[in-house]
Amino acid sequence: MPRADFYLIAKPRFSERPLLLVCELARKAFATQQPTLVLTRDFEQAEELDELLWSFDEDAYIPHQLAGDDDDGHTAVLIAPPGVDAPARPLIINLREQCPHSYGERVLEVVAADPAEREGSRLRWREYQRLGFEVNKFDM
């Protein structure tokens, strides 16, 4: 059964920069050798995440790139803005307002403290349940 985990941001560290939580999740995925696809809301967010993965922790090295290159299949973390095709991965970190069209074993939803984002996450929660996912919530 596929699983969807919702990470609801509450801590000041993440509420000011939600992409820091995405970096932490990508670090954990890389440490456990889970190929990961990050679905961003737009190209600007993809570029911001790309830069942040290099700089959020000077001791961390997470092989990553923007999707759409010949190396996509060999890169641990792919970052895909809308309109860019990316190969399916066992782990997806979803930053978009809708559920992914295809998914692997697990989807991580990062939800900012903004009330509008929380409402959208409730709709995705119900959609995952409808699709037969095991759904969990974690306060961050």
Image (cartoon, grey):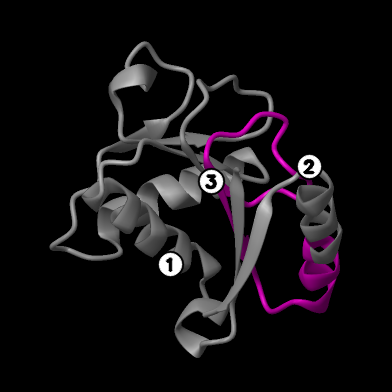
Q: Is residue 139 magenta?
A: no
Say whether disc 1 or disc 2 marks the residue closer to the N-terminus: 1
* In this view, the mark in front (1 or 2): 2
SS category of the residue bearing label 1:
helix
- The span picked out in magenta is 93-121
Say whether disc 3 or disc 2 marks the residue closer to the N-terminus: 3
Q: Which residue is mark 1?
A: 20
Q: Name above or below for residue 100 compared with residue 41.
A: above
Residue shown at the point (78%, 45%) measured from the top left: 98
In the image, farthest residue toward the top = 70
Amino acid type at mark 3: Arg
Residue shown at the point (23%, 65%) measured from the top left: 57
Q: Is residue 109 magenta?
A: yes
Amino acid type at mark 2: Leu
Question: Callout 2 environment at 10 Å: few (<14), some (14 to 19), or many (20+)?
Answer: few
| Mark pair 1, 2: CA separation | 29 Å
Question: Callout 1 environment at 10 Å: few (<14), some (14 to 19), or many (20+)?
Answer: some
SS category of the residue bearing label 3:
strand
Q: Which residue is mark 3?
A: 106
On-image quarter of the N terminus = top right
Q: Name above or below for residue 134 compared with residue 99.
A: below
SS category of the residue bearing label 2:
loop
Residue shown at the point (43%, 67%) measured from the top left: 20
| Mark pair 3, 2: CA separation | 13 Å
Q: Name above or below for residue 31 compared with residue 38.
A: below
Q: Which residue is mark 2?
A: 131
Q: Where in the figure is residue 105, as x and y percent of width and height?
A: 52, 39
| Mark pair 1, 3: CA separation | 20 Å
Q: Where in the figure is residue 116, as x and y percent of width and height?
A: 84, 70
